[in-house]
Image (tube, rainbow, N blue to C red):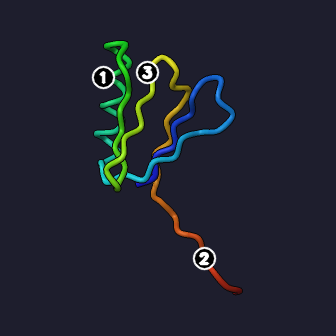
Amino acid sequence: MEVKIGVLHASRELVVDTDIPAEEVQSRLEEALSNNATFRLEDNKGRAVVVPSDKVAYLELGVATSGTVGFR
């Protein structure tokens, strides 16, 4: 699944491809916000993105789409 994280005062969003279900991603963010902690998300390759929860502007959850090659 593709997760887009908007960060305050940043011109670009963070994009993470992960196997974590959408419900768990959302609950992790809610927990980080309620505890004023960092929001941590791991991608498919084992790397982690860590953002202070008070800097998260938005979270967009969706299915990763692969680009098409060629003409129609």
Type of the residue with mark 1: Glu
For the residue labelled by badge 3, is the local secondary structure a helix, a strand or a loop?
Answer: helix
For the residue labelled by badge 2, is the local secondary structure a helix, a strand or a loop?
Answer: loop
State the quadrant of the C terminus: bottom right
Decide: is 39 above or below 47. Answer: above
Task: Please name the residue shown 53% across and 69% down the image.
Answer: 66
Type of the residue with mark 3: Ser
Task: Please name the residue shown 43% across and 21% down the image.
Answer: 53
| Left or right relative to 21: residue 60 | right
Whichever of callouts 2 and 1 sits on the residue coming sooner in the sequence is 1
Q: Name the one closer to the observer, 33 or 43.
A: 43
| Left or right relative to 52: residue 11 | right
State the quadrant of the N terminus: bottom left
| Cβ atoms under marks 2 and 1 closer than 8 Å | no
Label of residue 68 in the image: 2
The percent position of residue 9, horizontal first and vertical second, equals 65, 23
Label of residue 31 in the image: 1
> What distance separates the C-alpha of mark 2 from that of mark 1?
37 Å
Type of the residue with mark 2: Thr
The percent position of residue 24, horizontal first and vertical second, equals 28, 39
Label of residue 53 in the image: 3
Decide: is 1 above or below 26. Answer: below
Task: Please name the residue shown 47% across and 60% down the image.
Answer: 64
| Cβ atoms under marks 3 and 1 closer than 8 Å | no
